[in-house]
Amino acid sequence: MPENGDLMEQKQEKAAPTMRDVLSELQDGEIRQTALGFAAYLDERQLTPRIWFNKNYWRIPYGEHFLCSILVDKVKWRVFFFSGDYGGEFEEKSAKTVREYVRPCISCIHDCPKGQEMTVFGEKFENACFQFPVQFVNPDGGVLECIKGLLEYWKEAAPRSDSWHAR
């Protein structure tokens, strides 16, 4: 018999919007269509996003871990990959794309350990974001192909991730 807390969580999940619902609210039609196509890709692979903090924040579950997170507002959607091991095998063209999207620390929260030295597929970054070093904003089709490859990479990397958010 389910506990009261379990029933409440199940009711909230049923009442909560899906990521597809939230992506449908993006104002730009081209950005919206690309984002919805990515949501369909995730659904086809049973990587259905779970709501994280609120209807604008999502995480992609895989087993006991999470592969990445997605933030959605009215004008953009952003795919965040967590800190972890970016030293494994990855196709060079895609690795180059990933390196272009490594973000520096912006001191977003007080208790963050601040920017970290990190190597991402062979390139060293001195001040990478501690939590979400790889961030894609409104990715287009070519960048989405890289993100899809990075999702596959993270299926192996997530269990070894040092990120607070991959667990």
Image (spheres, rainbow, N blue to C red):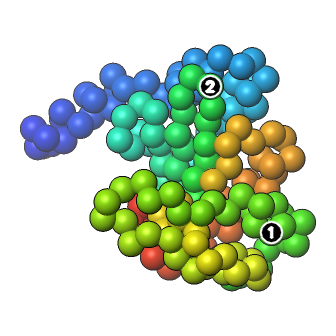
Q: Position of residue 99 (x, y in %)?
A: 75, 66
Which mark is drawn over residue 76? none
Q: Position of residue 87 (x, y in %)?
A: 68, 82
| Front-most of residues 73 and 125 | 125
Q: Quadrant of residue 119?
A: bottom right
Where, quadrant-wise, is the C terminus in this rendering?
bottom left
| Front-most of residues 8 and 91 | 91
Vertical comparison of 21 with 90: above or below: above
Q: Residue at x 45, y 40 (%)?
A: 57
Which mark is drawn over residue 75? 2
Vertical comparison of 6 with 148: above or below: above
Amino acid type of the residue tagged 2 in the rendering: Val
Describe the element under mark 2 as helix, strand or loop. loop
In front of the other: label 2 or label 1?
A: 2
User: Badge 2, how many Cα within 10 Å: few under 14, some, many 20+?
Assistant: few
Q: Residue at x 43, y 24 (%)?
A: 17
Q: Quadrant of residue 94?
A: bottom right
Q: Position of residue 48 (x, y in %)?
A: 54, 42
Query: 98 left or right of 52?
Result: right
Res. 85 in view: no
Vertical comparison of 84 with 39: above or below: below
Amino acid type of the residue tagged 1 in the rendering: Ala
Where, quadrant-wise, is the N terminus in this rendering?
top left
Instruction: Say which residue label 1 marks.
Output: 95
Q: Residue at x 77, y 61 (%)?
A: 100
Q: How many marks?
A: 2
User: Badge 1, how many Cα within 10 Å: few under 14, some, many 20+?
Assistant: some
Q: Position of residue 107 (x, y in %)?
A: 44, 59
Describe the element under mark 1 as helix, strand or loop. helix
